[in-house]
Amino acid sequence: MKYIISLYLIVALACIGNAQDSLVNYKDINQKKQGYWIKKDDNNNKIYEGYFKNDIPVGQFKKYHENGELKYDMYYNPEDLKSVTVTMYDITGELSAKGAYYDKKKNGKWLYYGADELLILEEQYDMGILDGKSIVYWQDKTHNPAEIKNWKKGVKDGAWTWYYSDGSIRMKAGYKNDKLHGDFIVYFVDGSTHIKGKYYEDKRDGIWEYYNEDGENYITISYNKGEITNKEEFEKQQTEYVNSLLEEDSTQKDPGKYIDNPELLLYEEKNIENPETQNSNARNKKEGFFKKLFKSKKNTDKSLK
């Protein structure tokens, strides 16, 4: 008789244990979510699924797009629930971004992807603030860096370099406390200098020289903190240069129109695309979530709220 009772108790306890393990969408007496939860919409599509402890996600947690594709695959560190790693996917199921949050702020390295899951952008964050190198990549077969920029506590500070897709330098410049400062040099594809000058706190300063592909200095402009100081000489050079171009080809650009932004002369004369524009175009080819993500990175910050 005792044996039968003991056997009964063992079976009963096992059933109770299994029932507890199989609980879904359970709230305790304090109405806090505990254990495994899965939420679905009116069409029975998953919205999210994962584990809770005292109303806080813990371990792996997944969210889904309306079409059923995985949107976020997150992992909440059980040792420190403020620490979350996340991988993001667009509505087609392609990889869009991955990185980490700490206390709902981006922290450490973040990677953003475009069409065919090709890396577009790499950034470094320190508690929600850009800090360190950001790298934009060409979206072609080379996949070389197109732009490398340095950040310090949320502002541009340090070397700023653009590259041609073959890896050669297109432009070298620098920032100091979020303002262009120091040498500014633009190169032709063969490495020869096209534009050379300096910035002083976002203003052109000193001698700016413009060269053609034969190495000839066709225009020199002298600046004093943004103001042209050799206007007469510049106008003479400009007229001579424009006249020479008109004799050769009436379709040539007038460099005088590019005083305020001489880099544009490079792009338009040589049909070279600005790397930031090039990579923006690449981003815009991406459908769904990532397209919105890249236009406003704040969208990613909302993912854990």
Image: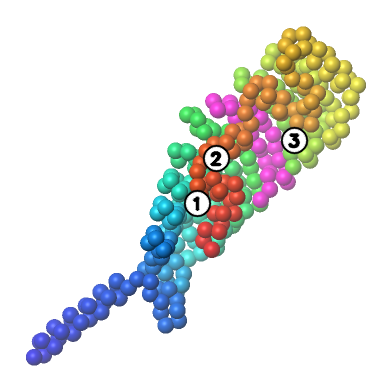
Question: Which of marks 2 and 1 precedes in the sequence?
Answer: 1
Residue at image mark 1: 99
Q: Work out whether 6 lies above or below 34.
A: below
Please check the rendered image and state whether residue 160 is part of the magenta-colored stretch, yes or no: yes
Q: CA distance from mark 1 to mark 3?
A: 33 Å
Q: CA distance from mark 3 to mark 2?
A: 31 Å
**What x and y, as percent, mark residue 96?**
48, 46
* Secondary structure type for disc 2: helix
Name which residue type carries label 1: Gly
Question: Which of marks 3 and 1 precedes in the sequence?
Answer: 1
Q: Work out whether 260 lies above or below 156.
A: above
Question: Which of marks 2 and 3 precedes in the sequence?
Answer: 3
* Residue drawn at point x = 82 percent, y = 30 percent: 206
Query: Which disc number belongs to residue 283?
Result: 2
Magenta region: 154-178
Whether residue 49 can be seen here: no
* Residue drawn at point x = 45 percent, y = 79 percent: 31
Q: Is residue 181 left or right of residue 75?
A: right
Count all numbered tags in the image, as a single digit.
Answer: 3
Whether residue 31 can be seen here: yes
> How busy is the neighbourhood of tag 1: few (under 14 within 10 Å), some, or many (20 plus)?
many
